[in-house]
Image: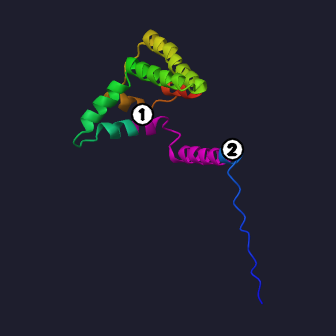
Amino acid sequence: MQTQTSRVVPKPAPLTRDAVLAVVSLASLLGLTVLALAFDPTRPGAADLDVALAIQDIHFPGWGAFIDVSEFLSRPIVVALIGFGVAVGFTTLRRWLEAGLIIAAMLVRAPKLAINELISRERPTEATLEILRGADGFAFPSGYTTGAVVV
């Protein structure tokens, strides 16, 4: 008479926060390394300019409307209203940390807007972009950079 033996298959260990953080960190480091190697260090900012010019050259139905909506949604008052609405939504859900982060991200825009008004530098035209292609040095930090640092 044969007896059946049951095999217990071990369950894989759940992903820990530290393991996920390690994978994300390594992926970020790899991505930054690829970016650093992909761009010509003798032309700082050239990749940004190339992308901006490529976007300007896109022509297909609906692209103009998409750009118009994107520009409207990125206006400071619209961003503030959307952010305020999201923060109110989080507070009604008693998600205080998320509401605080949204409010902090919105508040960081206030000094950025004030600095922009003081400096009053116009956005570059296509002719200016051609001149800036060979420019050396650092650029003034953008609002995206400032917001990313705060978050």
For marks 2 and 1, give the CA distance.
42 Å
Q: Residue at x 44, y 36 (%)?
A: 48
Image mark for residue 17: 2
Residue at the outermost bottom position: 1
At label 1, which amino acid type do we have? Arg
User: Quick one: which residue is furthest to the top in this view?
Assistant: 118
Task: Give the secondary structure at mark 2.
Answer: helix
For the point 54% across and 22% down, which residue is it?
91
Q: Is residue 116 magenta?
A: no
Question: Taking 1 as reference, is 80 left or right?
Answer: left
Left or right: 107 in relation to 81 = right
Q: Amino acid at mark 2?
A: Arg
Label placed on residue 133: 1
Q: Is residue 54 above or below residue 129?
A: below
Estimate the x, y position of residue 64 in percent, counting from the top left.
25, 35
Say the numbered circle drawn on residue 1.
Answer: none
Query: Where does the C terminus fall, quadrant-wise?
Result: top right
Q: Which residues are magenta?
A: 22-50
Q: Residues within 10 Å of mark 2 (few under 14, many from 20)?
A: few
- Farthest residue, direction left: 61
Above-or-below relation of 92 to 120: below
Badge 1: residue crowd in 10 Å (few <14, some 14–19, many ≥20): some
